[in-house]
Image (tube, helix red, strand yellow):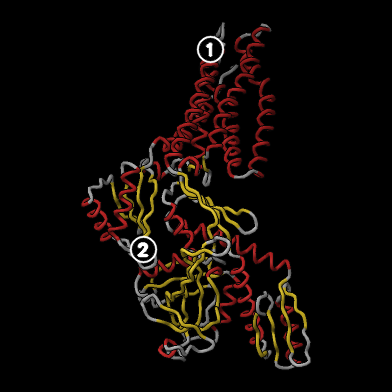
Amino acid sequence: MLNKYPLWKYLLVLFVIMIGLLYASPNLYRADPAVQISGEKKAVVDLNTLDTIKKHLTDQNIPIKSISLEDDKILARFDSVDTQIKAKDAIEVALGDESYITALNLAPTHPEWLRSLGANPMKLGLDLRGGVHFLMEVDMKEAMDKATKQLIDDFKSDLRESKIRYRTIKRRQGTDMIDVVFREEKYFEKGKRLLEKRFPDIQFIENDKTEAFDLRATLTEQRYNDIQEYAVMQNITIMRNRVNQLGVAEPQIQRQGANRIVVELPGVQDSAQAKKILSATATLEFRIVDTKHDVRDALNGAVPPGSELFPTNDGTYSLLKKRIILDGSHITDAQSGFDENGMPQVSIKLDSKGGTKMSQATKDNVGNLMATLFIEYKPTKEVDEKGLTIYRKEQEVINQARINQRLNRSFRITGIDSQVEADNLAMLLRAGALVAPIRIVQESTIGPSLGQENIERGINAVVLGFALVLAFMVVYYRGFGLVANAALGANLVMIIGIMSMIPGATLTLPGIAGIVLTVGMAVDANVLIFERIREELREGRSPQSAIHHGYDSAFSTIADANITTFIAAVILFAIGSGPVKGFAVTLSIGIATSMFTAIVGTRSIVNFMWGGKPVQKLSI
């Protein structure tokens, strides 16, 4: 029968719209201003901490909407931003310990059953939700120093393994070049061949051999660029992990230029706290403990040439070998658990290169202690000649464990005092080690009030555009205009639903502009269809035939117009910056949903209302 859908098509259209409505519904719930408390290092967040905070807030007459302990974090909700800020200050006084991280946040309020279905509100960008923006610069000098130091260790390890005797291997003062001095000419020739084979991206040059048999190693331009590229990309990955581990939701972290990183933290209202989280960059190193010398002698100034003295997390000191087995950048996973005796342990997995280094370093150290050295670069109040913050390097031994067998890509750290310490150590290892320190060179804060103002203006723009289009369609196309308006409403719901469903999709102010544009474009397809139906009616076709030919004839034109616009949106997303990408995302989604609602959606309503019926006149 003409203009009649089978039942399954009506149900399919209804199902798609209901799914969009379901996933769009969390956006109707307003987020609560909240304070999140988490522990750093050995700080424990438990029920005692919860009771302390609750009692102190009650004593200060600060009303709490709710407070709970989940996943070793406390989340306290409040009714207003002013109360939230007062509560944060009071909580910091109550805890009185810098090991606790107290961060302002916005907590979702939609029902648990929606969360269980994966239905969450749209992620809002910095310009809508407020938050902090940082432009950070990777310290490439430190990255090169670290890479050069690692090369020296690799040279020594390979030469020792091949029983090639050398006198000294050291970095040439003020350069990135490495001097390798051999004991005899026969070792020089063997060593040169071995190093050239093992390190094809290093250039080896022979020096004057009249008195010493030495070789100068310099980085090729490709290796130099690779080190810089690795430093930036690894730091981006590690910073994202650290921010996520510390509970900052939906961070936007991306590269800018050769050695800079842009970090945006929507919803974070405390710039100082965010800076603390990002600036306290850390690295990890595994070293062998020097048990042949007395720590007390080292404390009195007699530090052995091949060792260094470091403080431990229990207030004592430990003597470690200078040679670094490997750093945290080789760790791919770390999980806390229990060993066969029920004692806490941390299971660690390394990448292939890290596994090789660990195997070579531990084969001759079975029975010795291996230490995990935690290194932090903390900002000071001093600045350098460029006006950049000077960082203080703090080093601490956080764990020592005995090597019971030769280790490889998978091993475990035992001898840990408590499960809490094991959990914290696993978190630090998973978060990884920054290849080089990062400096904050620029920061800006967008307050939640400005973000709310942007949201209100954006919503007003959408509502105004929506209302004008609705009025025009009803006045100009009457009954069919109402059908188009229903499809337009479904289109808006589906855009919001899809934006809420896509992981990583963030709504920004330009994104709202894309929605406003989509509202206008969404009815364009219906205008083409309705005008074609009018034309068919003027040519004398019956209402049923005019509807059928109107939809069929207009389809190719609608498809051409929308496909070309979609291609333009894809190009904008591919080559555009953040704001342009936000516009392109909502425009692309809007084109796809408007095609569905304008062609399939309105056709379903028209068929349901007029299809297969003896209609003499259409309200169009």
Quadrant where the C terminus sits is top right
Q: Position of residue 504 (x, y in %)?
A: 53, 47
Can residue 520 be spotted in the picture? yes
Residue at image coords 67%, 21%: 554
Residue at image coords 72%, 78%: 217
Determine the residue located farthest toward the front in the rendered image: 385
Q: How many marks?
A: 2
Left/right placement of residue 424 relative to residue 589 reads left
Secondary structure found at label 1: helix
Q: Which amino acid lies under the numbered mark 2 shown in the image of this protein?
A: Glu
Q: Which amino acid lies under the numbered mark 1 shown in the image of this protein?
A: Val
Q: Which residue is mark 2?
A: 98
Can residue 404 be spotted in the picture? no
Quadrant where the N terminus sits is top right
Q: Tell me if mark 2 has few (under 14), some (14-19) or many (20+) residues whose alpha carbon lies within 10 angstroms of its own.
A: few
Q: Position of residue 45 (x, y in %)?
A: 32, 61
Left/right placement of residue 40 relative to residue 221 reads left
Residue placed most toward the observer, 436 or 387: 387
Which circle, 1 or 2, is nearer the viewer?
Answer: 2
Residue at image coords 34%, 72%: 418
- Determine the CA span between mark 1 and mark 2: 65 Å
Looking at the image, residue 315 lies above or below residue 432 = below
Labelled disc at residue 475: 1
Q: Tell me if mark 1 has few (under 14), some (14-19) or many (20+) residues whose alpha carbon lies within 10 angstroms of its own.
A: few
Looking at the image, residue 592 lies above or below residue 74 = above
Quadrant in which residue 190 is drawn: bottom right
Q: Position of residue 160 (x, y in %)?
A: 64, 87
Give the mark nearest the N terminus, 1 or 2. 2
Labelled disc at residue 253: none
Residue at image coords 46%, 39%: 451
